[in-house]
Image (cartoon, grey):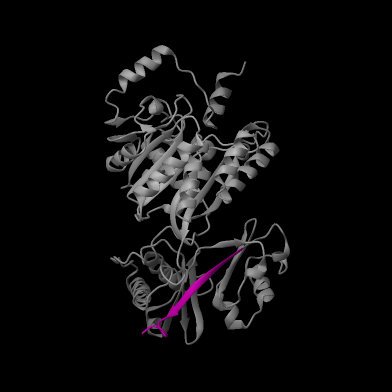
């Protein structure tokens, strides 16, 4: 017989379908939940995640900080996120949550599978609040009311929430990255393709043209297979994700070729994604063996984003006025810090300048480089990144001594606002003059901006070689299959060109 500790670890590492309800407990839960639509207390605080608010907050901050994510060229409308104990899966979940941190979402629909209470249909918590150690989260009762009104198979079944962890573990992450958002808590019963398709249609109708709604599908992948076998199954499962192949995923799951405990929420989200012509990007896939080192029986996890692509001629471009604003912020930040040693605060209302976006600030003096520092991926609004990078380029570029007050009038500022990053396998996708390159291998990383290749007249191969050398790698390291190559574009503007 397995010992208690081992069983507990298996329980935390997965969304295993453990059903231990007794008649007495069932009666008691029904009685306790007669008024449950008012407040839902946590089920797994202290087991799946820390119960202490500061410890929990700090852990999530750490997971978010450590997650390295590519940019997404569009509006994120959904996440696929794992729901095991934080020790096992939170680092994977953080990849998706990092991309939505601080974005403008007022309503978050969280769909989760039922592991402990067997029922058919869909259970919706209609109103009130969900408690976590980080505080209370309001339920969007207007949104839940519309689902309950439109969907016959949806109703409030309190027992579906009574012990469930798969929904709850998402909530502290939501609270950290979207602190003012309301939630729509949904637990889905026995997997039913028709239920998923119906719910997707209702969500599409209710959301309509709203840009402030995010949908989260909570799921783990394969359960308790040896490491290599689990990886093979999970690769197949994620392949169906990438093709938005809902019926293929359903059939593969029935046949045991794909495996995920949250198939109903995932198919709902993928169906919705197809309906609104969205795309998917897999951010991270791993399993409990990668965390614990025990490869005998592992549980798989994945993080993915669903997004609508931006119009390249529209939202992703900066207007002349926006460029002027950023150049002014860079200039005033640099001058104020050089003269006083203090950072200047700025109030910006423009939603484009408040988007989280990477940027580089370059300082030139009499036509010569005087400093250049930037961020590839930003956790802060673009205008704040520009303000910080202007200071760092002036003070902290290790290649130069700090800029002095006497030099300020001779400094000219360039800004490179970066597009989302795209990892590539085919170097022929690199367009010299349009794309910058990031080369990574192990702990080595190098980046060159698009304008560097143009300034030196490099061709694609020379550009790749020079980026490898910048990373501290051999110049032909870009040919090695273990080397990761990513590209990005940059909108470059300067005080000389923008008046």
**For the C terminus, which image quadrant?**
bottom left
Image quadrant of residue 236?
top right
422 vs 406, left or right, is right
At a point 51% along the width and 75% down the height, the residue shown is: 400
For the record, the magenta segment spans: 486-499
Q: Relative to 193, does residue 346 appear above or below in the rendering?
A: below
At a point 55% along the width and 51% down the height, the residue shown is: 283
Q: Within the magenta stretch, is there residue 322?
A: no
Q: Is residue 390 visible?
A: yes
Residue 205 image position (x, y, % from top left): 36, 49
Number of dots carrying numbers:
0
Q: Is residue 64 visible?
A: no
Q: Give the camera-side residue of 328 and 13.
A: 13
Q: Relative to 161, does residue 185 appear above or below in the rendering?
A: below
Q: Give the camera-side residue of 366 and 342.
A: 366
Q: Within the magenta stretch, is there residue 491?
A: yes
- Furthest toward the top, the residue is 24
Residue 335 image position (x, y, % from top left): 35, 75
Magenta span: predominant SS is strand
Residue 73 image position (x, y, % from top left): 48, 62
Residue 70 image position (x, y, % from top left): 53, 58
Q: Relative to 400, does residue 487 appear above or below in the rendering?
A: above
């Amino acid at each position: 017989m397995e010992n208690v500790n081992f069983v507990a670890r298996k329980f935390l590492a997965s969304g295993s379908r453990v059903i231990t309800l007794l008649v007495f407990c069932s009666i008691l839960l029904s009685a306790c939940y007669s008024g449950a639509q008012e407040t839902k207390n946590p089920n797994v605080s202290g087991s799946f995640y820390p119960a202490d608010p500061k410890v929990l907050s700090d852990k999530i901050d750490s997971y978010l900080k450590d997650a390295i994510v590519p940019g997404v060229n569009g509006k994120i409308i959904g996440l696929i996120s794992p729901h095991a104990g934080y020790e096992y899966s939170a680092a994977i979940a953080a990849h998706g949550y990092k991309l939505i941190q601080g974005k403008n979402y007022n309503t978050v629909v969280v769909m989760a599978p039922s592991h402990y209470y067997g029922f058919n249909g869909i259970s919706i918590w209609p109103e009130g609040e969900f408690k976590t150690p980080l505080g209370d989260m309001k339920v969007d009762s207007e949104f839940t009311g519309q689902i309950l009104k439109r969907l016959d198979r949806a109703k409030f079944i309190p027992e579906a929430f009574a012990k469930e962890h798969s929904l709850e573990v998402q909530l502290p992450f939501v609270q950290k990255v979207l602190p003012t958002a309301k939630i729509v808590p949904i637990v889905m019963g026995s997997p039913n393709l028709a239920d998923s398709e119906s719910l997707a249609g209702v969500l599409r109708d209710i959301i309509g043209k709203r840009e402030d709604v995010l949908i989260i599908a909570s799921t783990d992948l394969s359960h308790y297979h040896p490491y290599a076998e689990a990886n093979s199954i999970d690769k197949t499962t994620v392949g169906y994700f990438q093709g938005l192949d809902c019926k293929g995923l359903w059939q593969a799951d029935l046949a045991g070729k794909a495996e995920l405990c949250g198939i109903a929420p995932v198919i709902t989200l993928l169906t919705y994604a197809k309906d609104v012509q969205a795309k998917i990007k897999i951010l991270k896939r791993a399993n409990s063996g990668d965390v614990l080192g025990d490869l005998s029986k592992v549980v798989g996890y994945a993080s993915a984003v669903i997004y609508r692509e931006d119009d390249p001629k529209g939202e992703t471009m900066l207007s002349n006025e926006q460029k002027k604003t950023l150049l002014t912020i860079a200039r005033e930040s640099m001058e104020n810090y050089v003269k006083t040693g203090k950072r200047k605060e700025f109030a910006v209302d423009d939603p484009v300048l408040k988007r989280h976006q990477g940027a580089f600030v370059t300082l030139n003096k009499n036509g010569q480089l005087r400093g250049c520092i930037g961020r590839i991926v930003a956790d802060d609004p673009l205008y704040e990144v520009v303000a910080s990078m202007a200071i760092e380029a002036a003070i902290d570029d290790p290649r130069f001594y700090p800029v002095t007050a006497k030099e300020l009038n001779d400094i000219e500022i360039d800004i490179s606002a970066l597009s989302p990053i795209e990892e590539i396998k085919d170097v022929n996708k690199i367009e010299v003059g349009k794309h910058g390159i990031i080369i990574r291998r192990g702990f080595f990383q190098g980046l060159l901006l698009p304008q560097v290749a143009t300034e030196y007249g490099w061709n694609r191969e020379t550009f790749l070689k020079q980026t490898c050398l910048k990373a501290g790698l051999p110049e032909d390291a870009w040919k090695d299959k273990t080397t990761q190559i990513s590209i990005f574009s940059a909108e470059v503007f300067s005080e000389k060109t923008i008046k």
